[in-house]
Amino acid sequence: MKEMCMKYVLWLSLLSIIFCMSCSKPGPAGKWSVIETGKPDNTVFEMNFLTPESGWLSTWSGDGPKETEGWEVLSTIDGGKTWNVLADQAKNKIKQVYFINGKSGWALTLTNDILATKDGGTTWELQRKAGKVKVKYNYNNPTAPTETRDPITKLKFYSEKRGWAWGGGRQDDSYEQEGIFLRTEDGGKTWEKADYSFSDELKTVYFLDADLGWVSDRKGGLYRTVDGGKSWQKDPEDIKQSPINAFFFIDLNKGWGVGSNGYVGRTTDGGKTWIKGRAGKSFLNSVFFVDEKVGWVAGENGEIFRTEDGGLKWERQESSLPATLTHLQFFGNRQGWAAGNAGYLLRYEGLR
């Protein structure tokens, strides 16, 4: 009898241990580490990684080189251990770059011309000379529009053939500026000027593939294209809140958008309708998902949140940063990057 009691007690103890193990909170999903670029004051305006080890940063600082008006383009091929400044950046007057592989890339110059390279940035050739757009300064000369250089601020490519460049379009009481949206289907040899059908400056542009894309403007308007940006349809159900700062879609239906006050919207119908959610209370600037369940958002005060259920619940991750984060990029759920203001760059390593 005594032996049976002992076995019973041991059995209960074993069950208790198993139960506690199953109920224990899992450890952190991953770890963020600060990466030094040697440019502690530079703000990242474009982050363009090709692999977890190889990538480009287009950065700016008020104390940067005068020859490039403060812009510096950095690259790494060893996961951020070492960084190199783009060769002949001042000579070519380059401020931003975007690469799709180790050889083929494009650049935006200080005068908003578009250049292209086929040798990883060693040499560049002019593809498009900036044109002119109209702008009206309502506060001092409300009746006379003047011309200024194309206000291109961003360019991105989906493939060696298909790419886009855009900028301008600001509309308010003091300033009315013509916007520009360019597209190419031949790698930039020719650029087509699409109709700028947006109500203001664009906050974000996201393309899932060569044809399907979404944008948000400064007044909260949401637009969708199915023909690579030739035409845009405005969503009649605009999100009733401040503008969306970033989109991410994993297919033509499922996507997410982030904005102010921790807003994270989810859509399952390609952006026609949105389900509101929250990740903290900060201004969110970037979102990235590796599948329909696992994703991250990032924003002010170095805040990073992770979800494992498609955005229903968000868990804050430790970043130990006071600065604003503006860019996220991942390669699966175990390797990723985050960048932002004040020279901050983080690398993510998944633990489970």
Image: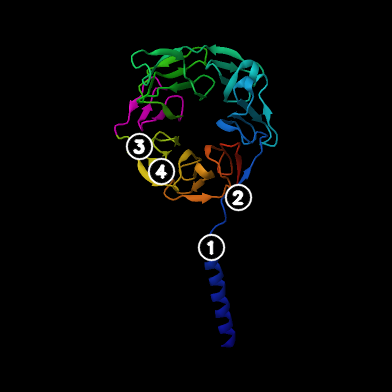
Nearer to me, 289 or 69: 69
- Please give the range of residues in magenta: 207-236
Give the crowd class for mark 4: few <14, some 14-19, many >=20 residues within 10 Å.
many
Disc 1 crowd rating (10 Å Cα; few below 14, some 14-19, many 20+) is: few
Residue 103 appears in the picture as rendered: no
Does the residue at mark 4 contact the one at mark 1 (Cβ under 8 Å)? Answer: no
Q: Which residue is mark 1?
A: 24
In the picture of the structure, the residue carrying the numbered disc 2 is 351
Which of the two discs, 1 and 3, labels the residue nearer the N terminus? 1
Q: Amino acid at mark 2?
A: Leu
Q: Nearer the viewer, mark 2 or mark 4?
A: 4
Q: Real-space Cα distance between discs 2 and 4? A: 27 Å
Q: In the rendered view, would you say 108 is above or below 6?
A: above
Q: Label 2: state its secondary structure.
A: loop
Magenta residue check for 205? no
Q: Is residue 77 left or right of residue 199?
A: right
Q: Earlier in the sequence, mark 4 or mark 3?
A: 4
Image quadrant of residue 90? Answer: top right
Q: Looking at the image, tell me whether mark 2 or mark 1 is earlier in sequence order.
A: 1
Q: Residue at x 41, y 29 (%)?
A: 215
Q: Is residue 84 above or below residue 21?
A: above
Instruction: Please tell me which of labels 2 and 4 falls first in the chain.
Output: 4
**Mark on residue 269?**
3
Q: Amino acid at mark 4?
A: Tyr
User: Tag count in the figure?
Assistant: 4
Identify the residue at the far right of this view. Answer: 82
Q: Amino acid at mark 1?
A: Ser
